[in-house]
Image (tube, rainbow, N blue to C red):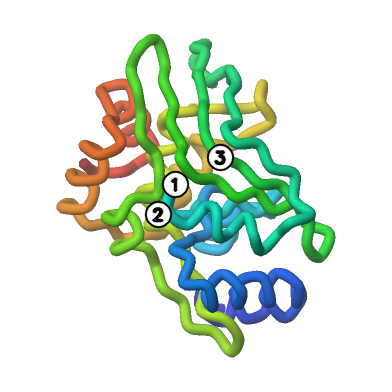
Amino acid sequence: MNLPDTINAWLTANPAIAEYFNQLNNKNIRWAIFAGAAVSLLTGNRQPTDIDIIVHDDDFTTAAQLTPHAQRKLPLECELPTGDNKMLHYKGSELWFSLDGKEIEIMSHAQKSIEGHGYNISFTDLAVKNRMTIRTDGPTVYLANPFDTMAIKAIMQRGPKQHKFDFEDTKALAKQCTFSAEYITKRSAQIHLGAREFTFLQKAGLHL
């Protein structure tokens, strides 16, 4: 089954999610599915635990207006453990709500730092321009460029201790997807990826 057919089947089984995507598009919100849900759709390697959606910083307020019932934290700020025994400081705008029995998480204004090294993982104009556009029988669906998901996972590097699959997901994307060297270079600089993250990506099979 190709990707449009996979997404069509998914939307048919989840009509409330399909309608929400329609609402995002009708409001001209710049958005994309990313993280585990994107990995699942692109590779079929596992079932996602939730659906992560990233939106352009300038569109977060409009997105929040579509879900007045959502739990909203602006900003959310917390400390999270990484898989290589570091502590990551996260700050961003978040929405949580459920559709079709699945947890939806909307993220924007995302900033991370580890031991003083800062990362900007917001959905920038560059990231929007390079997202994947999937035409379906219903709403147009957007997936973040696979490298965006890989970059986030290279920063977090979570594993069994965190009940996550960052290396496995990155490896699956590296095997399944094709990548633009120009985009990797520009986006890496924008996010501020360093030697730690590049080592992780190379071990997962991404040729930089």
Q: Amino acid at mark 1?
A: Thr
Q: CA distance from mark 3 to mark 2?
A: 22 Å
Task: Please name the amino acid that badge 3 sits on.
Answer: Ser
**Residue drawn at the location 51% of the way across and 79% of the way down:** 140
Crowd band around label 3 with a 10 angstrom C-alpha radius: few (<14), some (14–19), many (20+): some
Q: Quadrant of the C terminus?
A: top left
Q: What residue is shown with label 3?
A: 93
The one of 25 and 13 positioned closer to us in this rendering: 25
Q: Residue at x 50, y 18 (%)?
A: 88
Amino acid carrying mark 2 in the image: Pro
Q: Is 106 above or below relative to 204?
A: below
Residue 149 is tagged as 1
Total marks in image: 3
Q: Is residue 179 above or below residue 191?
A: below
In which quadrant will I find the N terminus? bottom right
Q: Earlier in the sequence, mark 3 or mark 2?
A: 3
Position of 5 with respect to 20 (left or right) is left
Please say if the residues under marks 1 and 3 sit with CB atoms less than 8 Å apart. Answer: no
